[in-house]
Amino acid sequence: MKRTLAMMLSILMLVSVFASLTGCGAKTSINVFNWGEYIDETLLTKFEEETGIKVNYKMYDTNETLLAKMDAGGSSFDVVFPSDYAISEMIKRDMLRPLDFASIPNYKYVDEQTKNLAYDPENKFSVPYFWGTIGILYNKNLVNGPIDSWDVLWDEQYKGKIIMKKDVRDTMGVALKRLGYSVNSTNEAELREAKDSLITQKPLINGYYGDEIKDMIANGDAAMGVTYSGDPMDLYWDDSADFSYIGYVIPKEGTNVWYDAMVVPKSSKNPKAAEAFINFMLDPENAYQNSSSVGYTTPNTEALKRMREENPEIFEMDAYWPSEEMLQKSEIYVDLGEAKAVYNELWTEVRVE
Amino acid sequence: MRLLAWPYVGWMAVFVVVPLLLVLVYSFTSGDIHDVSTWQFTADNFARFNEPTYLKVMGDSFVLATASTSICLLLGYPVAMIIARADIRYRNLLLMFFLVPMWMNFLLRTYAWMSLLSPNGLINRGLQALGLPILEIMPGPWAVLLGMVYNFLPFMVLPIYTVLSKIEKPLLEASSDLGANKFLTFWKVIFPLSIPGVVSGITMVFMPAVSTFVISSLLGGSKTLLIGDVIEQQFTYERNWHFGSSLSIILMIIILLSMAVMSRIDRKPAEGGRAV
């Protein structure tokens, strides 16, 4: 008797654990997994009010983290926001669901120039969300002379005041570009040279960080750091922040231009609701609000038009609207395939030194 | 009554034993993590650890963990003693001072240290206002050490306090009756009796300290890579579960070995105590 009771108890316990893991709500909901500080969160509420679909919102910090989470399985995401090279890996590995563009009518607002890019040549799987660059964000009070080259990140006079990104592609990319190589190099000798230069640089840097970099530079804890173009724009739009001493530059050697797009993973349980969310984000009004809130450049033609009318000054800024000449010198990341392991190994070596 | 342990046995089996076995299997195989048919037995994951890069990481982690455990012991023992000796009315209040910070999230506390220690942080602004030289430890190994000591100190104080508070007063009285001074009483009576608390304190501090990765990435700017960072990196970034698992197994073995050594120390003085 006791034995059966105990058995039943333990079974009951396991069942309840699994039941709570799978979870079952009557209301439709979608799991949205996005970069940190990468959406105007009031839009999520607006979407929930308009459609009655609940949004579970979570954040990640690098493409690699996103890929690892998706690879690990166990969680199902409905909309995620990977960058170019991560999208091509996902397509190659059959991780994405082709989109039904009939249920995304707002796709017509997407700038033709940002469609059919190399990572998704027939534009079957992705809808551009934002695009931008990588550059140097600096505090004008703490630098002397012009900041216009990646070399400045190796300048002795800024010892302890330089921050690099805790991201293998971005940090290796900067080192490669500075040496005049491609950010997509798979040449062993070039990669080793880049690694060695990062090791030489290590005593000069403050640390490797992520989203923290912007604040550390704004409050003067560091003089300069490698950031995405939205970081200076975020400070620009923030009325409580003083932008006068903030600078952002795309170094003359060129940089990485990236495109982040919305995609629906194969594991999505609710692709219709996911497409409704993508469509909602493409609405010109929402796209405008989002771009002016998080600071990145929108690929939405209507939102861009309004941006140009209301804020013409930002089209003079490298951070929002890089010049054609800059873009010419810059590259989009491509999926490294097998060479990923080499990058990871060199990156570990840099950090262990 | 014994049957009531069943749910716990079930829990342990599903959430402790099975995951551990999985880690063991991953550590001895290579291939696509989702496709068992591609798995092959290999010891390469363990051989890879033998590279200077990973040996250095392991060494650095042990040095930092040992340093923070020693500091926790040196700081924590007197504190535990003060609390244990305090008037019973204030004892709980004193303990509260120790426990209240632990109610806050660990990450939040570490972020707080980041803004306290940063070059333009609260501490440095205070020092500057007083005309003193500023503290340039953030980010760096000293800040990591400070973060570890701050976060893990309660784990040292609590077990030592528990043991100390159970020592019977008459024992101490007997010791002084027999002519021992305060130092001798401490060295011959109190300290030997508190060894079990010290041992569990050391274990409870050392284990999280040797495997932490949050503290080193926030307060160390990720410039010093610890073994916890490398393991985290394998799972959340490089997607190499096999290598990550073998590193975890190696770390586990080393921790188990050091615990075995510690438990020997635990036993010895007790026997010695009986002889006295």
Image (cartoon, coloured by chain):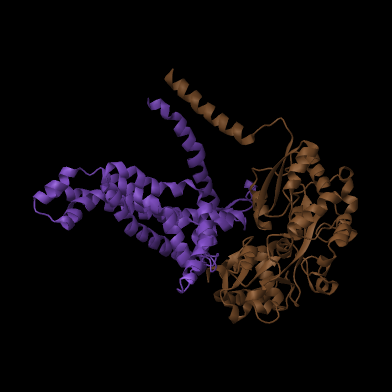
Chain colours: A brown, B purple
Determine the image quadrant of residue A121: bottom right
Q: Left or right: where does residue A31 sit relative to residue B191? A: right
B196, A10: nearer the viewer: B196
Residue occupying image coordinates x 68% and y 31% = A25
| Residue A218 seen in this snapshot | yes
Outermost residue toward the top? A1
Residue occupying image coordinates x 60% and y 78% = A158
The image shows residue A251 at horizontal and vertical percentages of 73, 75
B249, A126: nearer the viewer: A126
The image shows residue A141 at horizontal and vertical percentages of 64, 75
Residue occupying image coordinates x 51% and y 37% = B14
B44, A157: nearer the viewer: A157
The image shows residue A206 at horizontal and vertical percentages of 56, 70
| Vertical order, A18 against A281 (above or below) | above
| Vertical order, B174 against A260 (above or below) | above
| Vertical order, B235 against A204 (above or below) | above
